[in-house]
Image (cartoon, coloured by chain):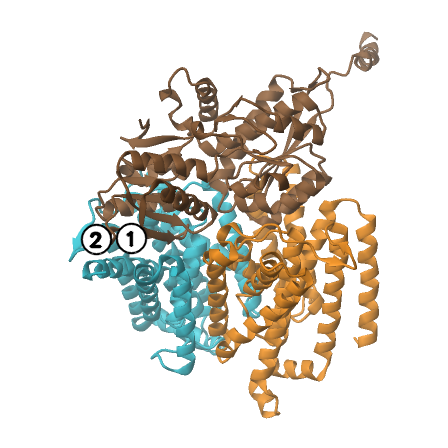
Chain colours: A orange, B cyan, C brown
Amino acid sequence: MDAQRRWRLLGAVGLVVAAVSYAVPSSYVLGILVFVALNGLAALGLSLVMGFAGQVSLGQAAFFAIGAYASGLFSTGLGWNPWLGVVAAVAAGAVAAVAIGLPVFRLSGLLLAMATLGFGVIVYYVLNNWAAVTGGPSGLTGIPPLSVGGIAIDTDARALVLVGFVLLLALGLAGNLVDSRVGRALRAIHGSEAAAASAGIDVMRLKLAVFAAAGGLTALAGALYAHYVRFINPSPFGIGYSIELVVMVVLGGVSSLPGAVLGAAAVVLLVEALRALVPALGASHGAAEYEIVLFGLVLMAFMIFLPGGLAGGRRRAA
Amino acid sequence: MGPAELGQYLASGVVVGGIYSLIGLGFVIVFGVTRIVNFAQGEFVALGALVLATLSARGVGLPLAFTGAVAAGVAAGMLLERVAVRPLRAMPSLAILIVTIGASIALRGGALLVWGTDPFAVPAFWAGPPLVLGGAVIVRQGLWVLGAAACVFALLWAFFTRTYAGAAFRACAANARGARLCGMRVDRMRLAAFALAGGLGAVAGAVIAPITYATYDMGLMLGLKGFVAAVIGGLVSPAGAIAGGVALGVVEALAAGLVSSAYKDAVAFVVLIALCLAQAAGWVPWRVAEEG
Amino acid sequence: MRRLLFLPLALLLAATLPAAASEPYTVGAIFSITGPGSSLGIPERDTARMLEAEINARGGVKGPDGRLHPLKLVIYDDASDETKAVLAAKKLIDEDRVIAIVGTTLSGTSLAILDTTQRAEVPVVSCAAAAKIVEPAAERKWVFKTPQSDALIVGVLVDHLKARGLVRVAWAGVDYAFGQLGWLAFEKATQAAGLTVVANEKFAQKDIDITPQLTRIKAAAPQAVVVWSIPPSASIATRNYADLGLKMPHFQSHGVGNKRYIELAGPAANGVSFPAGKLLVAEQLDDRDVQKPVLIAYARDFEAKYGSRNTFGGHAWDAVKLVVRALETAGPDRAGVRTALESTKGFVGITGVFDFSPTDHNGLDRRAVVMVQVVDGQWRLAK
């Protein structure tokens, strides 16, 4: 769709989000939406890498962590304004992406996936063990909230408006990117690297650029998370989260940017829906255990019946 | 740090490496034949360990209990293939990867339901104090692990190179469409590959359970390490998986012993990245199979 | 004819009877029933449910209005994950409208829900150990915790080491919060007591072989070794210790305070000593100990239904009982419950005897910890 329509659509969604934030009193529902938006933003970064640069990254959680810790550390340890922390987080994410991308993007397919996996694990271990700086496994408490024009973003409603706005902006910009010359070059690479290179496209530079953008986006999500929960530790950012992000992207449809957000919503909502439904079915003693089994089964069913993802339907996952 | 310590690090590293090798072989079987990365492989390991633990606790003799564990693994592998993989056989590997992720979650949840969170002890196959070889201590079960890895490897090698069915498997791995055109039953081979991987995973689980205990979530980390071992070796080569596993185990032990135990796992993954780069640059004598 | 009359008469009677059921008191709980914390969270959940049934069998909680109110416990699983814990807390507060929250199981998740619960002004009684959960007291108005802090537990251990002349010690801790906090407390305590730490090793909870770390420790020639973890890695470390033929006194953490540890480690566990709550050796306590009857009753009830006793279940017992006591004083009022909790004095619980105050939301002292030794597969109170 063209840029004008896209921005109008996003603007309309934005208005709905703002309305929801002020109409819904339950901080539980708002909290779910905030986490959907945060995960959606993180998954959006990964979607750019997977859907458009065609690379599988099994270590995307590392960028989320880098963003969260960069912003958290700058605003608590150094006492910076949280917004500066956020900017630092995005920069850190992009720089880290380039740093790992340079050596690793020479690889392809499985080797690339393994290298990103290794990167994710290494970042986790550094965060977990470098206690003097990161606080180690017990993490950082007391992270200040962001504030916009003097209003502190410390309620769920305000957080939803902020994160929602950022997400919609990111969707719009990413959409513009995909439709631009750069985007067409990306799709050419995805189709065939050799052909793209022979058409004069600088494959390495472009892939690196996408990876850097993705790293920055996911880091941004991490920073916003830190200022929302106000506490971070390494444990939510391990390989499990990297895999969850891949699941979100594929579930939503690999070649679809809004699909990433849909996938994020599906995963978060599925967990909460199971939490609501399963005890009602009478299994109050073993409820939590049943929830896990059902989550796995539902995920499998999703992929079997909708292999193109939520946004792709029965089409092949491009 | 003297030679005695170094000997111990090597001995421990080789045994742990043997564990990783056994698990890595399961990934190799499935990927080699179907080009699928089976994320649920670690859960077959957990299943084998847990079934063996339960049967042993009920008083079933070791050979029968072991067989039971392997049978459970084979059944799980076949179930996974029929229910999850077969419907998606025409889809790109990413979709199949996600479905195996879903399967691994479901299997783990199922194990939690049936066995709970407690670890289970399994008696060692050959009871007795650990052996001391040149100053290094090796538990007897460690010999079983290495022995099992060697046996499995030998059987697989013989199967793939000396039997008609094995040659068919290899043909299927090289080019599925071509194999089908030659009249080979690709569907059946995929089922067999998953059944074999399930059984292999269960063997691994049963053999390592006396060392690691059987826990419902042991499959996660072990599956990951086994996967790394397989990839180091090129993911299509059983010999590569063995070498990769032992290399990973030894590097981990040496890193913990010589450098710092804090960063042990990080070191292993740095080595992994270095090896990936080395493979891409052609500095190592094996190649990773191309995808697709 | 008579039958037809019976129904409307019965209805009339029912309508005129005084409402026997008064409004229930809803209390929320968040435990790690799945995920890495499940071996702690499951006994906590079981204990909470057991208490709920016990209380409701007696008719409920007697509120300040003199009437019995059934206790309704809403328990959610946070899967040992910080995000899920935050959402569970929000659900309890907004949808289930709980008066107070018991939990969480792990320190990370307890710290994660701080912001949500403090802003909503809901009292929380945590079953997690990190001191940061209730400190600094000025910023933790609404949070309390029942487990002993690491400083307390480690302090008793270090005193024990010093009393036995074991001054060169080695440490091997698990690499997540439990091990890290234990190390920080141990480092401080040994410095204060004048002990020397000759080796400081780490291992992962999922490690299947701890011999490299123990080999390094052996080379440093310590007089005693302290391993800080929970099963299964604690059991693996114990077996590795025996396999390597290490003879120095072997100490573990309170994380091994359950029968499973002994079953898994086998004969290698004999001789291991660890600091723990009194629950494990309840029967061996002096009859004058005020906790003895409470401990024995809980151990007997829990073991009848769920299996061997467990100090983590005890933390949940204390938390639920404290909240119930506060409800008896203040009724279904969040601020009132908070004040009642903060004024609790001399509450005889499983973990210890609690004395809360505005500056101390943990309320325990050294009496809450004893040294226990494994002898012939049984726990013995070490003198």
Measured as percent of width and height from the top left, residue A37 is found at: 70, 58
How far separated are the C-alphas under marks 1 and 2? 9 Å
Q: Is residue C245 above or below residue B91?
A: above
- Which of B46/C137 is in front? C137
At 55% from the left and 54% from the top, the residue drawn is A236
Q: Is residue C91 above or below residue A301?
A: above
Count of picture labels: 2
Q: Is residue A184 visible?
A: yes
User: In the figure, residue C133 lies in which quadrant?
Assistant: top right
Measured as percent of width and height from the top left, residue B143 is found at: 23, 55
At 69% from the left and 19% from the top, the residue drawn is C63
The chain letter under disc 2 is B
Q: Judging from the image, what secondary structure is the residue with disc 1 in?
A: helix
Measured as percent of width and height from the top left, residue C295 is found at: 45, 22
Q: Which mark is residue C133?
A: none
Residue type, label 1: Thr
Q: Which residue is mark 1?
A: C211
* Quadrant of the snapshot with the N terminus of chain C: top right
Name the side, left or right, on which A20 lies relative to C171.
right
- Which of A285/C280 is in front? C280
At 62% from the left and 39% from the top, the residue drawn is C138
Q: Which mark is residue B137?
A: 2
Name the side, left or right, on which C345 lies relative to B1.
right
Q: Is residue C375 above or below residue A267?
A: above
- Which of B167/C140 is in front? C140
Q: Is residue B86 visible?
A: no
Q: Are marks 1 and 2 on the same chain?
A: no
Considering every residue shown, the one lying at the far left of the view is B134
The chain letter under disc 1 is C
